[in-house]
């Protein structure tokens, strides 16, 4: 479980880092002198709010990872969620929808 959290945190961190770099260095390429001053503002605000949510999610995942390491240093074997159950097969993890009882997505 900690390995999965680390992969998710790493992916979010990479995505956030790319956005931060783009916002600081490259966004000017999309601004034209002839455009009204606020033509991109609405879109940029929407994108920044989305990345704010991604940053909050990353922080929550980092906290969960720390709690899992502190509470169960030997690892976690099962997680219960009201909508999904984690099922394991040899070397395969997938989510099983609790309503249809069918695999819904492959984790790794």
Image: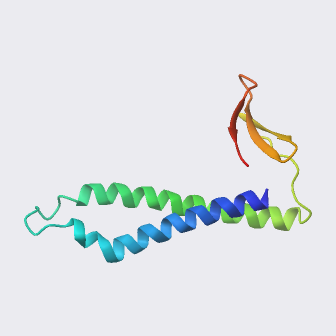
Q: Nearer the viewer, residue 108 or 71?
A: 108
Q: What residue lies at 31% left-to-right and 73% top-to-bottom?
A: 26
Percent position of residue 34, x then y: 7, 65
Q: How is the image coloured?
A: rainbow
The single residue placed furthest to the bottom in the displayed view is 25
In this rendering, position of residue 35 left or right of residue 77: left
In this rendering, position of residue 83 left or right of residue 46: right
Say if 31 sits above or below 101 in the image: below
Q: What residue lies at 24% left-to-right and 60% top-to-bottom?
A: 41
The single residue placed furthest to the left in the displayed view is 34
Residue 82 visible? The answer is no
The single residue placed furthest to the front in the displayed view is 91
Say if 79 sits above or below 56 in the image: above
Percent position of residue 102, x then y: 73, 26
Percent position of residue 84, x then y: 73, 35
Q: Nearer the viewer, residue 79 or 71?
A: 79
Q: What residue lies at 88% left-to-right and 50% top-to-bottom?
A: 77
Q: Nearer the viewer, residue 26 or 20?
A: 26
Q: What residue lies at 45% left-to-right and 60% top-to-bottom?
A: 51
Q: Quadrant of the N terminus?
A: bottom right
Percent position of residue 106, x then y: 70, 42
The single residue placed furthest to the right in the displayed view is 74
In this rendering, position of residue 13 left or right of residue 108: left
Q: Residue 99 is drawn in which quadrant?
A: top right
Residue 64 visible? The answer is yes
Tell me how many marks there are. Answer: 0
Q: Residue 96 is drawn in which quadrant?
A: top right
Q: Residue 97 is drawn in which quadrant?
A: top right
């Amino acid at each position: 479980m900690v390995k999965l959290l680390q992969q998710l945190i790493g992916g979010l961190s990479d995505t956030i880092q790319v956005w931060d770099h783009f916002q600081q260095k490259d966004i000017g390429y999309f601004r034209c002198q002839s455009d009204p001053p606020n033509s991109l503002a609405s879109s940029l605000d929407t994108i920044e709010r989305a990345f704010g949510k991604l940053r909050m999610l990353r922080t929550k995942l980092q906290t969960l990872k720390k709690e899992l390491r502190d509470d169960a240093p030997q690892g976690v074997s099962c997680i219960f969620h009201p909508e999904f159950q984690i099922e394991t097969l040899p070397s395969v993890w997938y989510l099983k929808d609790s309503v249809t009882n069918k695999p819904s997505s492959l984790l790794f």
